[in-house]
Image: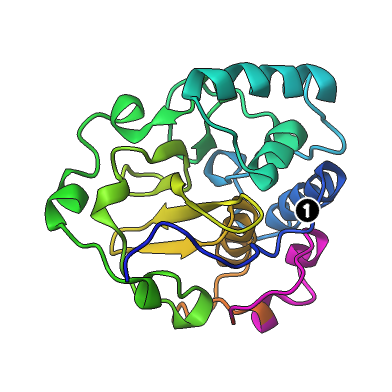
Amino acid sequence: MNTNRNPRHSGYAGSVDDWRKFLSCWHHEARRRKGYNVTYSLVKRDVLARPPDIGDDAIREEIKKHEKRLGLRLPRSYVDFLIAYYPTETTLKDLEFLHISAIDKLDKVFPGWGTEWAASGANPDDADYFTYGTEQVDVTRARYIKTTLAVGMHDSDSPFMLLLHPEVLTSDGEMEAEAFFHAGSARTPSFAEMMRRLYYSKVRPQPGSPPISQEMMRGSCADLLPMTGVWWK
C-alpha cells in the first residue's frame, strides 16, 4: 500500500501563546549554553520580550493572502508558529525561517536542490513511511519533491532544509514536516513536532546522538508546546 494519507491525528494541541512560551524557553536555554552565539541559533530572539512588529490579525491576513497564492491551506501548527515568531527573511539563508511571502515549492526557493532525492525513485510503502519517532526508518518519498514547500534551513549548509509536504496530511490537517541532514532526514507528523525535536537536538545534544524520544524530551522546553495522544515513541 502506498498512499498519501496518514489516518491518525497529528497530536498537536498547542496555540500561538504556547508557541511564544516554547520559543522563549528555547531562546533562553540556548543563551545559557557555553559559547552561545545568536548567529548560530535557529531561534534568534525572545518572542515574549520582542514580539513581531505587527499584530496577530495582520499576520493572519498576510497568511491568508499567501495561502491563496500557494493554492492550499497551511497547517495550524505552522500558522501558529508564523504568528508567534513572524520570520522576516525573504531569501533562504543558513539557520533561518522564511517569511510567509517567500514560502514556495522547493524548486522555486532552491532550484536544483533535491535532484538526487528525486532521482532515487524511493517511494516506500505506508508501513515504513508512516513510522515516526525512534522507530522511524530513514526513508523518504521521491514523488513528493514537486509539491514540497521549503520553509527554512536549520543549520549552516544547504543540505539542512526544513520542508512541509502538502500531499501528506494527518486526520486533523497537519502536513508532514521533514528536516534534512548530511545523511538522511527526520520526518514528523507536524511542524510542531519537528520543532520540538530540533529544539532538543540543538540545545541539549546528547553524546552519540541517540534518537530523540518523547520520554527524553519530558521536563524540557518541549513540554511548553503541548501534544496529546502521541502514538510514536
Q: Which residue is drawn at the image coordinates 58% and 45% (left, top)?
A: 42
Asked if one can make out residue 54 in the rendered structure from this viewpoint, the answer is no
Q: Main secondary structure of the magenta part?
A: loop
Q: Which residue is drawn at the image coordinates 36% and 27% (left, top)?
A: 109
Taking 126 as reference, is 36 left or right?
Answer: right
Q: Which residue is drawn at the image coordinates 63% and 29% (left, top)?
A: 87
Query: Picture coordinates of residue 92 (x, y %)?
Result: 42, 29
Q: Which residue is drawn at the image coordinates 52% and 36% (left, top)?
A: 96
Query: Picture coordinates of residue 116 (x, y %)?
Result: 15, 50
Amino acid residing under circle 1: Phe
Q: Quadrant of the N terminus?
A: bottom left
Q: Is residue 194 above or below residue 150?
A: below
User: What residue is disc 1 on?
Assistant: 22
Provide the residue span drawn in magenta: 215-232
Query: Picture coordinates of residue 196 (x, y %)?
Result: 65, 61
Q: Quadrant of the C terminus?
A: bottom right
Query: Picture coordinates of residue 37 (x, y %)?
Result: 59, 45
Secondary structure at badge 1 equals helix
Q: Is residue 156 above or below residue 51?
A: below
70 or 224, nearer to the observer: 70
Q: Is residue 231 magenta?
A: yes
